Amino acid sequence: MEDERTFSDICGGRLALQRRYYSPFCREFCLNCPRLSLRSLTAVTCTVWLAAYGLFTLWENSMILSAAISITLLGLLGYLHFVKIDQETLLIIDSLGIQMTSSYASGKESTTFIEMGKVKDVVINEAIYMQKVIYYLCILLKDPVEPHMISQVVPVFQVSTEHFPFSNEILYFSAYLLPLKFSRNVNIYCQSIGRYLTTNFSYFKSSPLR
Amino acid sequence: MGLVSRGAAAAGLGAASAVVRPGPPDAVPNPVPSPPPGGAARGSSRVPGMVLKAFFPTCCASADSGLLVGRWVPEQSSAVVLAVVHFPFIPIQVKELLAQVQQASRVGMAVLGTWCHRQQEPEESLGHFLEGLGTIFSHEPWLQLCRERGSKFWSCKAIHRQVSAAPDVPSEDQVMLIFYDQRKVLLSQLHPPTVVSDHQDGDTMASTGGLAVVFDTVARSEVLFCSDQYDEGPVRLSHWQSEGVEASVLVELAKRASGPVCLLLACLLSLISAASGCRLWKLWPLPFIRSKLSTCEQLRHRLDHLTLVFSTQKAQSPAQLMRKANMLVSVLLDVALGLMLLSWLHSSNRIGQLADALVPVADHVAEELQHLLQWLMGAPAGLKMNRALDQVLGRFFLYHIHLWISYIHLMSPFIERILWHVGLSACLGLTVALSILSDIIALLTFHIYCFYVYGARLYCLKIYGLSSLWRLFRGKKWNVLRQRVDSCSYNLDQLFIGTLLFTILVFLLPTTALYYLVFTLLRLLVVTVQGLIHLLVDLVNTLPLYSLGLRLCRPYRLAAGVKFRVLEHEVGRPLRLLMQINPLPYSRVVHTYRLPSCGCHPKHSWGSLCRKLFFGELIYPWRQGGDKQD
């Protein structure tokens, strides 16, 4: 079963969220990030080449032009391969773990799998971005040496956290993850936010947020 | 077909928890399958609420029907299938084999269930036969995996018999199939390595992460993979070796030959280290020279590496094995690069050209220094120096340069011979050649080092004098006992002389400071060049090339974790996942398997370096461990 919704992120780009339901204990959420815009690419390339041409007229050395071309090419390849994330996927498998995949524009995929045994809790964290407060979901990992300490806080969507749109989607995720045995901290958050949302958004009324 | 109905029944059980309500699409169904009515089973047969995970090797997916053999991990409710036992078999022999394997590998083996591959056989008779097997090999829960003809979807069931509420009706459980590549999981190592603790009765307890247990189980069960379905033994097994036993003639020959070769080389190396450790080398000034030359340090380092590589002891752990392999590859690369350098040097008389160029270069450097000193003795950068001090210092340094030039000219006939013999040492490795180059640079710029030391000492004395006289000027003094500044009343003549000396030192400060600055900059330049060479040597010494090559060619050997892919899914069928190995990123490979370096790194921070420069303290960038220098 698939489902798709579109949102707009904080910077104005379009985000598409797809939800796939494979089985009662396996779900996948795909977030498609905004693509590389032709406008910004053209702007950057023109700036670099104009600057290089300016230097060329100053110094009459053709190496500057070839250097500018190779810098642009290498920079673009590096950006596509290391920076530009195309799609992020979250796969949740009951009693096995949570897998987060980021696929870059050049085709590279980097996957992280967190076993259920290492997850201490799932919380909603707040961040202040310019003038607003945005909420994002993160996973707290147990410290291997001290079982009561937290060793790492892993945001669920790496790049898109700063673009993450609405708190209802977070609650959707958290409400799904909740029954997978984490209920302490998210309970407190969700009860307060959930109460607010159940009074205002009708489709949350039917799902009990434990 | 009976199996389809069974599959539907299994889906029916799960369907109760997978209700998709019509209406609001965001309704969240309860994803956890409700536990069976019996509640928690007694003992540790499974954890209630956890889905049963069956790890199935991909090589057995096309095997004939038979019994599933492997390990049951109750804490994670997962069954790791290691092999399939084919018909015909005698149950007693199967149990004996499993007991043998359990004793040899200390992993709890059991018959987990049945495997049915319905490509050729008629359907019904086998079904009943397989159900009967459940009573011979009792295992809780009993897995039944079945693959149908013409369909890529499987059906799996896990039957629990001993549920207290309804003892006659076996209850079924949700099963999730996870395929894994047995050969890759067998050969890979997880990073960071998790230690699975041993229990008293020989079975290993899975106290740490779940997937490490799977890796550990497969790795320890190598004994099980020795016999095959094509062997003549009593039990016919199917596992990853059924696709063809892997071996390489070269690897086997190398393994056989490595024993005597290691022994021979170990004896040779012990002779060399005994010779280098003998008493003759402890006569002064040899230890002093040895501590100064980086070549000796590098040679000793390489000797240590070779001793470790060719030691006759087997490696205790995979990390030690990787370290040995990395050292061997590093030494081989070093020697190869050194031989290339050697061939380049000795071709077309490069040594002669170098030797011819060396003396003029040294002359040129000395001339430039003389010009610099003449400039300092005049009015450098428009500053007005104290004439007398300027002349004294300038003449002193000029005389030194003159001495140095004479020594170089004295040595010039022998330089080519010396260089030729030193160039031969490149066959010991590129790192040795680079260390020799660094030492030659240090020797050739010895006069700059001397000037730096003179300038720094003078400046240091001046600064100390100034600070102490400044305190006197203000009426204070340094209390050595209490390590602080205290007020003190001086006599008039003390104050008078102190103030006079203070003014003299203050007015002589610019001259000394300028000389100090110039020579410190020169010294830092030489130190930078030497530092770059040492950095290169360090890179060749510590880069784990074998691990990087392994990561490039066999990425599954170095695993950072696993990743899952959901295979084609049909509603009502059990979920099928493919578990693949997530290889370690290159940066972590380098970080984990770096070889230990020489240890001659500058240990100052930038702040302490600036402080030392300001106060005129001498800087020793490569203090060898434990040395005391003046």
Image (cartoon, coloured by chain):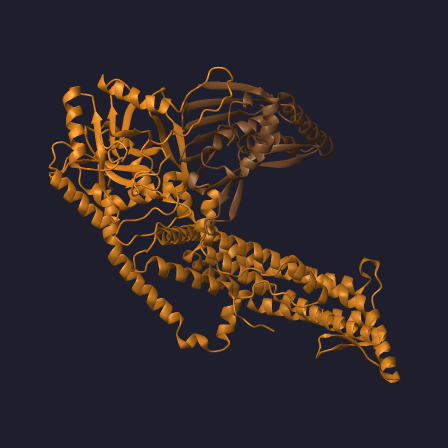
Chain colours: A brown, B orange
Give the image quarter of residue B73.
top left
The image shows a total of numbered marks equal to 0
**Side of B118 relative to B311 (left or right):** left
**Side of A82 relative to B132 (left or right):** right
Residue A46 appears at what percent x and percent y? Answer: 67, 25
Residue B370 can be seen in this image: no
**Side of A54 relative to B248 (left or right):** right
Residue A210 can be seen in this image: yes
Q: Is residue B478 above or below residue A13?
A: below
Quarter of the rendering occupied by the N terminus of chain A: top left
Q: Which residue is farthest front?
A: B165
**Side of B150 relative to B498 (left or right):** left
Residue B133 appears at what percent x and percent y? Answer: 16, 32
Residue B595 appears at what percent x and percent y? Answer: 44, 54
> Residue B234 or B517: which is nearer the viewer?
B234
Q: Is residue B423 above or below residue A169?
A: below
Give the image quarter of residue B127.
top left
Q: Is residue A54 above or below residue B192?
A: above
> Residue B12 or B505: which is nearer the viewer?
B12
Residue at figure coordinates x 77%, y 68% from the top left: B512
Residue B582 appears at what percent x and percent y? Answer: 41, 37
> Residue B553 or B241: which is nearer the viewer?
B241
Residue at figure coordinates x 32%, y 45% from the top left: B216
